Amino acid sequence: MSEIYDAKKDPQFSKGFIDIDEMRTRTLEDGRELPYRYMHGGFEGTDVKFSFCFPEKEAYEGRFYQYLSPFPGPDEELASLPMTGEDDKIAFCLTHGAYYVESNMGSKAIFTNSDDNTMTHRSSAASAEFSREMAQKVYGYEHRPYGYVYGGSGGGYRTIACIENTNAFDGGAPYVIGSPYAIPNCQTTRAYAERILRHKIPQIIDAMDAGGSGDPYAGLNEEEAAALREATLFGYPLKSWFCSADLDDGALPVLMPGVKMQDPEYFEDYWKVPGYLGADPDGNAVRDRIRLDGKIAQVNVPGLKAQILEGKIDTRNGVNDAWRKMIASEEMDDEPWVELETEFPGKDPYVKGAVMIFLTGAAKGRRLQLGRIDGNRVYLTDGFGMDNIVETLKMLSQGDEIHMDNSDYVAVQTYHRHQVPSCDYHAWDQFRDAEGNPLYPQQKVLLGPGFSSNGPGCKQNGLVQAKVLIVAALMDEQAYPWQADWYRRKIASVHDGNEKDYCRLWYFDNVLHDDRAASVDELHVTTYAPGLKQALVDLAAWVEKGIEPLPSSHYRVNVGSVEVPDLADERGGIQPVVCAAANGGKCARVKAGECVQFTAEAEVPKDAGVLTYVEWSFEGETDYPYKGEFELTDGGKSGTTKAEHVFAKPGTYFAAVRVKSQRDGDKSEPFTQIKNVDRVRVVVE
């Protein structure tokens, strides 16, 4: 067992300082103003900077919540200051008896902490301990504030590092977390399936949507069905395929250079050695590979939009957008393109991940990312590790020679087949034979643990030093849902199977990886953010008062899929369950002008609260403008509601209902209204 880190004994963080100390005010959406004392500072001799936000004395209950971003940047300690509404982490703390802590975790640049990758959890612990010193001064009495650390995705890894390796925190809430083998395998499985299925994605989405056939394999050929099955067995939820409509591979473009740097032989073997997909001359990898030379005919150099950068805070610290800080982008007033002397060959070029390399002229050696192709015109887009688009285009001349290549991006998409870990990772069972041996050639190094530990500075061992409440998303398209169960079992395995005293895991249905309520498409899904905040409240009650949280959700892991019961009490957790119908079914067929009858039944799990709100969207309104009322039973735990709507124009509509519940039934509580949604299809003739 490794030694537990004590930041109070570390001389590197012995000289904390405060350079800003002032009163500020935050305003809630209902107009309430929250005065708070803001402090900013750091540690002498380090790159660590932090922000503390203290509520007024009468609102303080002796605790703090500390958020860890997935990809810290040099000014990360400021990232939460501009947040508003449900996303306002600071206001949540101020209204729940806590002060707020956020730091840049010692980062001198985006994603780069320091030469010492333990800096993340050590500096986080040091910031926590120094905040305790400041809290005593702010509130004027000696005490040790309880501390709770939380973060999602990459921030979940960092949270786990803090609660396993330091003594600074009393509780932790890692959310939408990955396993030690999440990266890059979750990204590659999705990217491969998207490439093979890129022309069939709309029908998969339709099959899995409300009122659809429920059979996503209908109409797929053998290769396409195999690709969908591979992704599904690995954990990509079938209900989440609408996220793939634009072939968004998440953070894979950022991660791929690291894969190539650590395993360059793979990208050579892939196209040559039997057993790798690229070595099959008739395979889809060779079919979609681009290696094309050409000459420039003309160039469109867009202008740059005016940008006011001074004093602007980069707020991208959520689990779905923090990684985008790694990609330099420009605000252009037009789409940049390069026109070639000859038309791009082929009817169906796969340009995702393709790079244009300049071979001659003033831009020789520069690289730009391809976006799309139209005839002989190649449109360019921002890409990780690429050169400045406008600057590069200005350097080009007619006749300059270029090379376009997507070989590496195609190759990395089946990397997971050659990274088979131990047999307790069942998502890889499809790549093992009957004796448990890998079906494909294996690389010398399993990269997953390196990726998952480089940022946090350690590997997950389950030896938690604090109470843990894990929040996970059943439709997580980035960190597949089974991985939260993996960590829950890891904690249990090192505590003699007794997880009850250490851990809870709550799954939330109809939610994706994203933790920003403002960016979620709430007509397809909703957000787990209010549930996460309730988890933080319950975590504090568990630690400070001994009030045990509700039990973990009831679920089963079927290879790579997490399945939950339909009924709320059987499912458990804290999220309400809702089921909607149109004219009594999931799909209604009516004539224009005919009134459609909508119903919804909702239920809250036992002891999780009562229903508070029901809202409808009939024709794609994102703000759910139609407010309903529940006919409540069982003390507000269950309820039914009705609505009606007339569709004036023909078309296919997806009407959605959104319900909310709150632990105490408090409709005025702004942060812990826990949501769920359901959809129905209405075909209007």
Image (tube, grey):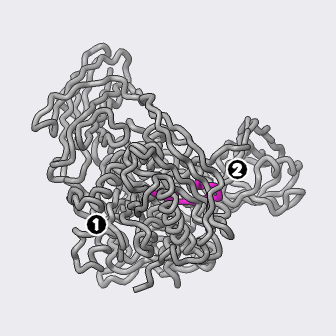
On whether residue 334 falls in the magenta region, the answer is no
- Residue under label 2: 344
Q: Estimate the spatial distance between the alpha carbons at disc 1 and disc 2, rounded to whole Å.
A: 56 Å
Residue occupying image coordinates x 21% and y 47%:
608
Q: Which mark is residue 152?
A: none
Say what secondary structure mark 1 lies in. Answer: strand
The vertical placement of 214 against 459, above or below, is above
Q: Nearer the viewer, residue 178 or 120?
A: 120
Check disc 1: other Cα within 10 Å, few if <14, some if 14-19, many if 20+: many
The vertical placement of 645 against 454, above or below, is above
Instruction: Point out the stretch of residues depicted in magenta.
Output: 66-77
The vertical placement of 638 against 472, above or below, is above
Label 2 is placed on what type of residue?
Phe
- Residue under label 1: 503
Disc 1 or 2, which lies upstream in sequence?
2
Residue occupying image coordinates x 31% and y 42%:
674
Q: Nearer the viewer, mark 1 or mark 2?
A: 1
